[in-house]
Image: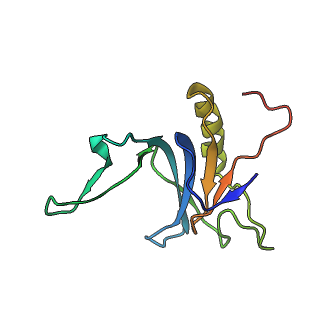
Amino acid sequence: MSEAKQPLPAPRLQLRWEANPDQGIYSWLCHYELVLPLDEHDIRREVYDDEGEMTGKVDEMVIAIKPPTKRGGGGVPCASMEGERYFDPPFRDGVHANWDAKHLGNPPIFAIAPDGTAFTKPETPGQQS
């Protein structure tokens, strides 16, 4: 398992954590997403403001696979109470990412901590792709 804050490969599957802005009983939201690279002349790279002015370009398209998964509790995703950092997907979304990766040609799977740190899915001994 590696920890990264550099550009990630695309295509990829990612489980991206963020604090829940609603601050209900669920402190965290995890977005299960497919990230695709965009070619230099792809019109989908263009970003516009509310007035219709182009404000920039992006290199990737992020596609939500399902609504966010919610998690409660006091801990921060991808971090243990002792301060260790690790790949931390919601159980079902993590299993679904494994299944989906098989159908998509086995792109890498990342868990993205709330601070933006990315963790690659560790290889499981005896795991079949």
Q: Which x, y percent locates residue 49?
A: 21, 62
Q: Residue furthest left?
A: 51
Depth check, front residue: 7 or 111: 7
Check the image and tell me how it is coloured: rainbow
- What residue appears at the point 55 percent right and 29 percent down from the top-left corner? 104
Q: Is residue 26 visible?
A: no
Give the residue displayed 60% in from the left and 36% down from the top: 107
Residue 82 in the image: above or below residue 90? below
Q: Residue at x 70, y 55 (%)?
A: 87
Image quarter hosting the C terminus: top right
Q: Quadrant of residue 95?
A: top right
Q: Residue furthest front?
A: 40
Q: Position of residue 113 (x, y in %)?
A: 61, 63
Question: How many numbered discs sit on the rendered protein?
Answer: 0
Report the residue at 48% width, 53% height from top: 68
Question: On the image, which quarter does residue 21 sit in?
Answer: bottom left
Residue 117 spot, x, y in % from top left? 62, 63
Is 117 located above or below residue 57 in the figure?
Answer: below
- Specify whether residue 89 is in view: yes
Residue 24 horizontal side relative to residue 57, left or right:
right
Q: Residue furthest right?
A: 125
Q: Is residue 41 above or below residue 128?
A: below
